[in-house]
Amino acid sequence: MPVALTLHDWLLFLHVLSAFALVSAEVLFTFLLVTLWKTDVPADIARVSGTAFLGNILVGVGSVGVLIFGILLAFEADSYAIWDGWIIAAIVLWLVFAEVGRRAGKAYDAAGARARALVAEGRNEPNPELGVMFRSPTALWLHVSSMAVVVLLLLDMIFKPGA
Amino acid sequence: MLAATRPTGWDFPLFLHVLGAMVLVGGLTVAVAFQLLAWRKRDPADVAAFTRAGFRALLAVALPGLIVMRIGAQWVYSKEGWSGDNDPAWLGIGYLTADLGGILLLITIILAGLGARRLRRSGGSKSVLTRIAMPLATLLLIAYVIAVWAMTTKPN
């Protein structure tokens, strides 16, 4: 079976693969949040917070890839244009995601760094300050918002309102 | 930018299919990351925690993702009117990874769960079962990336 793929095929694959990386990062961050939600023990938080590094790589590669390959697709494809409403909506949602995700990451990275500092100081007893940082309603709200924006992006890509 | 032109009645089933697939791949990514950490660590507490986290990612994230993805896939399939005769090759790849991959995922979950339980009881830092589960989960992740390629590029 001969396989003849066009530039459009490859751009679409890389665009979708980037979206998978982005969602994988969101899944990882959510999983860490749920796993650590009830603990104030620095070693427990420090142990798994290091895996957020993988999430940061995935979210970086995924978000940049989605945008770049998406824009290239818009220019390459005859059936849509960069100024189509649903594509402009996607770019606006991407910008919102970038800012909300940056703020959420900053809040949780600070909690992870504090946990690692406490472990390095040999203080592994439950730490209420750590719990307050980790269960911050603001940080949680930012994380949930970033997930909601990702779902909106997916809805926009599939339903293509106005197309 | 998924399929450019299709009846709007397919949008919601396709949304479910893609969302489920993304959650499935996300769950597998998380599981493989934790299983890899468990493999590399020596401290029994670390190994037990990472092994348990890997098992939970498979059970609570990847499995529900697979179910949603598969329901969405069947829904789209029924709307597209395929009958099984002369279905395109990319659809066969999708079915193969969804169904055989589903069985492999269940086996991986069982092995990872049993391995995590044995580690907790023994307090050890090595489990043959979890060391079998890790390559299986990695294999599944690779298979689903190939499925994403087949689903998006639709070769022939």
Image (spheres, coloured by chain):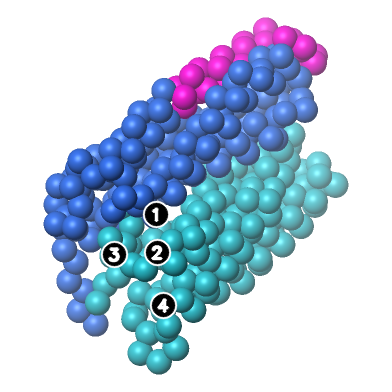
Badge 4 local density, few (<14 within 10 Å), some, or many (20+)? few
Label 4 secondary element: helix
Residue wearing tag 3: B5
In terms of secondary structure, what is the magenta stretch mainly? helix
> Mark 3 belongs to which amino acid?
Thr
Q: Chain of mark 4?
A: B
Residue wearing tag 4: B80
Q: Which mark is residue A117?
A: none
Q: Image quadrant for the C terminus of chain B?
A: bottom left
| Front: mark 2 or 3 | 2
Q: Which mark is residue A159?
A: 1
> Mark 1 belongs to which amino acid?
Phe
* Residue B125 in sight in this render: no
Label 3 secondary element: loop
Is label 1 on the same chain as label 2?
no
Q: Which mark is residue B8?
A: 2
Residue A152 higher or lower than A96, as above or below: below
Colour blue maps to chain: A
Looking at the image, do the residues carrying marks 1 and 4 touch, with CB atoms under 8 Å apart? no
Colour cyan maps to chain: B
